[in-house]
Amino acid sequence: MVHLAPVRRGSNAIESLHRRVNSIKLEKEDDDGFYSSVYGTRYAAEALPANEMPEKEMPREVAYRMIKDELSLDGNPMLNLASFVTTYMEDEAEKLMTESFSKNFIDYEEYPQSAEIQNRCVSMIANLFHAPQGEDASEHSMGTSTIGSSEAIMLGTLAMKRRWQNKRKAEGKDYSRPNLVMNSAVQVCWEKAARYFDVEERYVYCTESRYVIDPVAAVDLVDENTIGICAILGTTYTGQYEDVKAINDLLVERGLDVPIHVDAASGGFVVPFVNPKLEWDFRLEKVVSINVSGHKYGLVYPGVGWVVWRSPEYLPKDLVFNINYLGAEQASFTLNFSKGASQVIGQYYQMIRLGKRGYRAIMVNLTRIADYLSQELEKLGFIIMSEGRGHGLPLVAFRLSPDRDTLFDEFALAHQLRERGWVVPAYTMAPHSNSLKLMRVVVREDFSMNRCDSLITDIKLALKTLGDMDKTLMEKYKR
């Protein structure tokens, strides 16, 4: 998460360590080099620049080592079980991506093959989502790469809003009060999209027993100003899949011309391989756009996302800009402009390297490991809030039993696990059910069964440590 930070002013200099140290005379080193190890240079005894750019250069070896040492204070990405983001790629993929760092993807004229690779990825993903293939070009699905699903969702929201506005204008009706129906457990980028683009947020709130959208309640919120309904294929909180088909069927039954956008950020690269019979994509007539994150279960380093529309009808032409100042005519529908080509190339590598069988093997393994972890946590007395056996994302959401006779809660357990290096988040549920506390383990590609057993061992140890602390506190209280 990126935080807003105040601009600080001041000197980079630090106070003298000690007068006796300052009294030692050292030979002045050359500005352009050093003759000791990195830690024998003056830079090792100075604070790194923090507020102002330094006047002079620093040797590259020193700059590298100083920054690397500071970054060593970060956590181990492989032990960060809070994140869906990919933390492992093969050496060959990393090499390809490194070789493409200098390519500005938006410059199609200069890098036509990178653009062609994006087009191939869009086609593969659209076909994975059963996009319709009409004989006429006007019926073909369309899509683009984005910087993660956040941008993809922004573009999807803009397309739904503009299409609704154009329709209302043509009918001579008011188009100033658009609204969007969604679950209160949506990822924050949906709230951003609604507020940034002046769309009213209409929530179907979670309850203490239901953590996904209620299809009937969602369709009941629809009126003439509704630009669309958001359905989530794998919620952030519990990893459950929302019933897209039920929403679709209700809209058809009631004759409502309201589109569905499926937020498949996490589930888009899981469901086609683990639960292919589940109907959630373009097989449903009301689904007009889908986003998916390549940097989650698409198995690519951050950040890359994808968004696909059923046909050009659902992407208004006035949102697409045509430019020619990069050497050729090209269409652009993005929120940003320049971006690197590396992640798109990394996505293409993964899709042709693994193929459907490779993705299926990985996703099935992750599902099995998640099911195993769920069973072991249940044996320890935890209540499991996620769904297993491929009916939800390969993650485990769990909470302590309310009937336990302990004083500690999920936040204390998360803190205890952090001492062993594990990042297992504790958080409260979505609005209207936020009295519930829970924890979540995201099972990613590099979370093997061996690592899973290590986590279980550390959870048992953490429970014992916290339990002993509870006993000590109770004994003090009784005295």
Image (tube, rainbow, N blue to C red):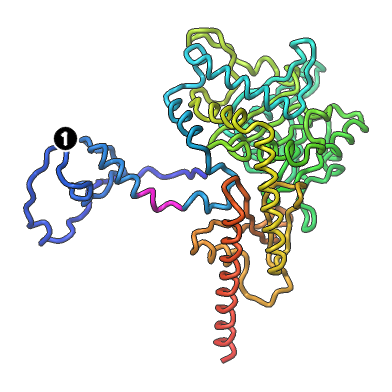
Q: Is residue 140 magenta?
A: no
Q: Is residue 215 left or right of residue 235?
A: right
Q: Is residue 457 left or right of residue 166?
A: left
64 up-or-down from 197: above or below: below
Q: Residue 275 falls in which quadrant of the image?
A: top right
Which is nearer the eye, 219 or 29? 29
Image spot of residue 167 (x, y percent): 78, 19
Q: Is residue 226 left or right of residue 342?
A: right
Instruction: Bin the neighbour count of mark 1 within 10 Å (Cα to Cα): few under 14, some 14-19, many 20 and up.
Output: few
Which is nearer the eye, 97 or 85? 97
Q: Residue at x 21, y 52 (%)?
A: 45
Q: Which residue is mark 1?
A: 32
Which is nearer the eye, 398 or 447? 447
Image spot of residue 73 (x, y percent): 40, 53
Q: Is residue 21 left or right of residue 255?
A: left
Kindly give the residue lying farthest to the right in the view shown: 253
Q: Quadrant of the C terminus?
A: bottom right
Q: Which residues are magenta?
A: 70-75
